[in-house]
Each structure stands twice: as C-alpha cells, then as structure tokens.
Image (cartoon, rainbow, N blue to C red):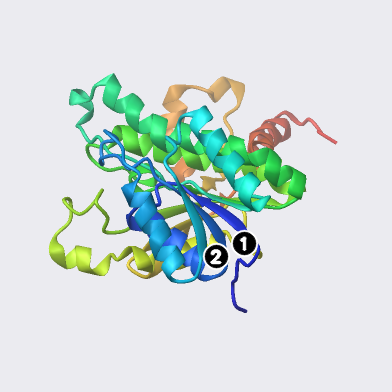
Amino acid sequence: MTIRFDNRVAVVTGAGAGLGREHALGLAARGAKVVVNDFGGGVDGSSGSSAPAEETVAMIKSAGGDAFAHGADVSNPEHVEDMVAKAIRDWGRIDILVNNAGILRDRAFGKMSMEDWDAVVRVHLTGAVTCTMAVWPHMKEAGYGRIVMTSSSSGIYGNFGQSNYGAAKMAVIGLMNVLHIEGAKNNIRVNTLAPGAATRMTQDLLPPAVIALMDPKTVTPGLLYLVSEDAPSRAILCATAGGFARTFILETEGIHLDADNCTPEQVAAQWDAISNQTMQHAYETGGPQVMKFVGKAAAAAGISLG
C-alpha cells in the first residue's frame, strides 16, 4: 500500500521551518496541495515575517508541487477565516489540517507571568481550536476530514519550566477526544502527534549528538499516516528519531467503598488496590468510566441496573 494525497488539500500551520516544513513537504511530495501557514515570528511568538512560509512554498513548487503561503496568526479568527477562504476559492476543499504552530516561553512556574502563560496557550491550544473550527464545516459537508493535533512529552509526562506549554499540549489531547466522537459520523478522524525533533524550539536545549539523531524528517512519516485515507482516529502517536510508539490513557479497575467506610482513611488504606494496574481500561468516552463506578455501587447495594 502506497499512501498518497492526490486531489487532497492540506493546511499545515507553523510550516515555515522545522517539523511543519517537513510535514508540508511530505504531503506535497505525495500529491497534496498545501496551504503553508506561518506567522514567521520568533520562537517566543514576537514579530512576524512571510519569508519562512514563502521559502517552504518555493521548495514545494521547485519539486513540482502546488502550494501557497499564508501568514495567519492561528489564534486570530479573522486571519484564519481568510486563509481557509483562499484555500476554498483556489482549490474548492480542505481535507487535512495539521495543527503544528507553536511558540515557547519557558519559565519555572514561580517565575512565570500571566503574559507568558497566555501567549503560549493562545498559540498551541486556542490556535488549534481556531483553525479546526474554521475547517470543520467544510469537512462535515464533504463527509471527509483528517485533523492532527500536536502534543509533546512535556504535556503527557511533564518537563521542568514548561507549565504553560505542557498544559496546552495536554489540552489538545482532550480536544482530540471530543472531536473524534463528534466527527465520526462525517468521517472526520482526529489524532494527536507527540513529536520530538531538533528544531529551533529545541536546538538550544539538547547536546549536538542528540540533535544529530532527531531530524524532523524522522517524525513526518508518522504524521503522514495519521492524515491518510486509512488513518486511525483518537490515537496519540509519539515519534522521535525514527522511533514510533502509541500512548494510551489507561485507568485502573479501582475499588468500591461502602457508605460506612467511604473515608479518606480508607482511601489511604486501599491505595495499593486503587493503584493496581493488572486490570486497566482505555475508555473511548466518559460514560462507561462513570458507569464502572455506578455498577460497583449498585452491586454493593444489591441493586439491579437492568
């Protein structure tokens, strides 16, 4: 099976360099028409320039592909609506959205300002929402869509000095979970990529030997699968240095405490049983998780839920 994107239109945010550029190049090389979005600002989100996006477009066109650049601030609804309108005007459809744009303003939490917090959350989380909201009705009407959020090990597992970044990167997983459910009937599949790559956002944080192994090109194959015709949905794919793994959010079976023993002391006493991982569940929606506990309570009370 060869994965192709002929006659598909993709929007890739933050595609002026690094991972976004590789994603855009990879999609174009396999037949997609690509909207190359990049605000062109610094790593901290300051200033702006059309040059990075235009460079990516030139690379795509020199290889025989089709693309145009757009410098939308992904968190600005008017900018994003303009970008989407131009794609629809020129190509008539949007099939793929890669929410990749991001900035960094790292600080230890005790030294972080609300300005730094808001700036990072606005790009990573609100930007993903704004872009997804703009393409959603077009995908629903077409009965087809492939959307990828970009998370990070900093969001899934944590990293010192990145509370703003980590919170936003975990939040997009929650967004994916809901959009997976809401988009299913219209064949809109939503996934999350959690990449590790040597880009301008990470190059000062890693030793040269590590950077040499973490080429963004080694991540993009995972992205291309997540937006393909036969893509999964609601998957979290981790990708670094040619390595690929899937993260699952699991919940232990847990316990039930009756009314006479439902105390914090009993929670402490039963902590090992609560934490026992031998029977874990990966829930697709919140309802079954709630009913697990309700079922235990009903069984303890001798109540049949029918």
What residue type is disc 2 on?
Tyr
Residue 41 sits in quarter: top left
Residue sitting nearer the eye, 301 or 241 = 241
Residue at far right of view? 306
**Rendered location of residue 159, percent (x, y):** 27, 43
Q: Are marks 1 and 2 in contact (CB under 8 Å)?
A: yes
Can residue 305 be seen here? The reply is yes
Residue designated by label 1: 231
> Residue 240 occupies which quadrant of the picture?
bottom left
Secondary element type, mark 1: loop
Front one among 247 and 224 = 224
In this orientation, which residue lies closer to the viewer: 194 or 247?
A: 194
Q: Residue at x 42, y 35 (%)?
A: 73
Q: How many marks?
A: 2
Q: Left or right? Give the position of 209 relative to 50.
A: left
Where 262 falls versus 23 (above or below)? Answer: above
Q: Residue 184's spot in the image, x, y percent? A: 72, 48
* Disc on res. 225: 2
Q: Nearer the viewer, residue 168 or 141?
A: 141
Please state the horizontal and vertical placement of residue 28, each as a whole percent of the image. Answer: 51, 65
The disc, 1 or 2, on the residue closer to the chain's N-terminal end is 2
User: Whole-Å distance between the Cαs marked 1 and 2?
Assistant: 6 Å
Quadrant of the snapshot with the C terminus: top right
Residue at the spot x=25%, y=69% of the render?
213
In the rendered image, residue 276, in percent from the top left (x then y), is placed at 47, 48
For disc 1, the neighbor class at 10 Å (few under 14, some 14 to 19, many from 20) is: some
Mark 1: which amino acid? Ala
Circle number at residue 257 = none
Q: Which quarter of the figure is the N terminus placed in? A: bottom right
